[in-house]
Amino acid sequence: MSVMQKVLTTAAMATSLAATTTAANAQDMRIALVVKALGIGFFEAAAKGAEEAAGELGGTEIIYTGPTDTTAEGQIEVINSLIAQGVDAIAISANDPDALVPALKKAMDRGITVISWDSGVAPEGRMMHLNPSSTELIGNTILKLAADHMPDGGDVAILSASATATNQNAWIEAAKAVLPNYPGINLVATVYGDDLSDKSYREAQGLMATYPDLKAIIAPTTVGILASCQAVTDEGKIGQVNVTGLGLPSEMAGCVESGATESFAIWNPIDLGYAATYIAHELAAGNAAAEPGASISMGRIGAVTLDDTNTGAMSDPFTYDASNIEEFKSIF
Ligand code: RAM
């Protein structure tokens, strides 16, 4: 092939790509918002944000989907079905950083835009990852929320989601890294409730039985924090064991009111779903490229800047307590 022919072929490819892009831009872009599991309030709030972004962008349909439990196997089935449906983009909160890589690679090979958000996929399985906030900041925040109410120090335990969840594992690691900054706070155990209410409840009960001097349960999961609050309440341990971590104001209002929870934190999950959808759209439409240093629009939220691993963060978490819970409990 002559140089000129090559140039022409490349130009033709560019034109046909542009044509596809325009078609996707104009109408019928289907973006799948794949969550860890269905039935979790946090993800339902994110889906609201996804719908909001789709409405603003126009011509965009959101397919809100996920398995019934927080497993990688369940998500692989969902991904394969989305590949078969030929969606334009998959935005996934992963139950495992590595297990989903082959299925997501297959999706990208078929021309599907793949990003992770909330809970990440290893770099080779996605084009970029959107963290809700800085991992270090979240790790420090969850520990500080407990320590702030423990003037004399004491034992704390972590009740997490699933043992393979990328986001919780990263936050726990970040919390452990700053433990030396909180002298007198002993982390005695980390247990996993798999983001299932009943399992999380039993794990919280187990912690209180095994560690009678426990002063705080730190649950960096909206499912785990609520289940822990219920377990502490049922055991009559309000005032002895403070439940904290990451929760939804709408679900945690009663826990703050009863005193089972002094304070907790979260970012806005509606904004997170909105931002993930906006980014997926921009990449699928060819309006942005996922590469280190890139700045990609998140619509009304601003722009995200990607680091060397094509990872960026949306915003900072916010702390809720008796002073502001009323204001936020009807929003998310
Ligand atoms: C649960 C999920 C989600 C996490 C929140 C804080 O809803 O585990 O991935 O971001 O908690």
Image (cartoon, rainbow, N blue to C red):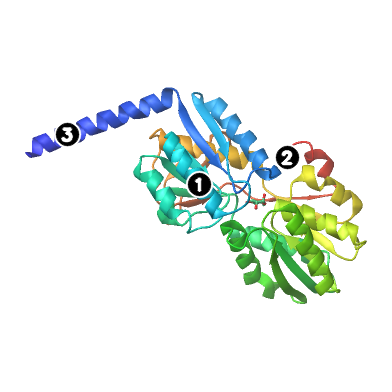
CA gap between label 2 and label 3 equals: 51 Å
Query: What's the mark number on residue 128?
Result: none
Compared with 117, 173 (above or below) is: below
Q: Which amino acid does label 2 sit on?
A: Phe
Q: How far from the left and from the top, in percent, is residue 126? A: 44, 50
Asked which secondary structure carries label 3, the reply is helix
Residue at the location (9% across, 35% down)?
Answer: 4
Residue 10 appears in the picture as rendered: yes
Q: How far from the left and from the top, in percent, is residue 212? A: 86, 73
- Pointer 3: residues within 10 angstroms few (<14), some, or many (20+)? few
Residue at the location (84% across, 71% down)?
Answer: 209
- Quadrant of image for the C terminus: top right
State the residue position of label 1.
77
Cβ of mark 3 under 8 A from ligand 1: no
State the residue position of label 2.
332
CA gap between label 3 and label 1 equals: 38 Å
Residue at the location (86% across, 60% down)?
Answer: 232
Asked which secondary structure carries label 1, the reply is helix
Q: Which of marks 1 and 2 is nearer the N terminus?
A: 1
State the residue position of label 3.
9
Q: Which of marks 3 and 1 is nearer the N terminus?
A: 3
Q: How far from the left and from the top, in percent, is residue 97? A: 51, 58
- Left or right: 301 in relation to 40: left
Q: What residue type is labelled 1?
A: Glu
Contact between labelled residues 3 and 2, with CB atoms less than 8 Å apart: no
- Pointer 2: residues within 10 angstroms few (<14), some, or many (20+)? some
Q: How far from the left and from the top, in percent, is residue 214? A: 83, 71
- Quadrant of image for the N terminus: top left
CA gap between label 1 and label 2 equals: 29 Å
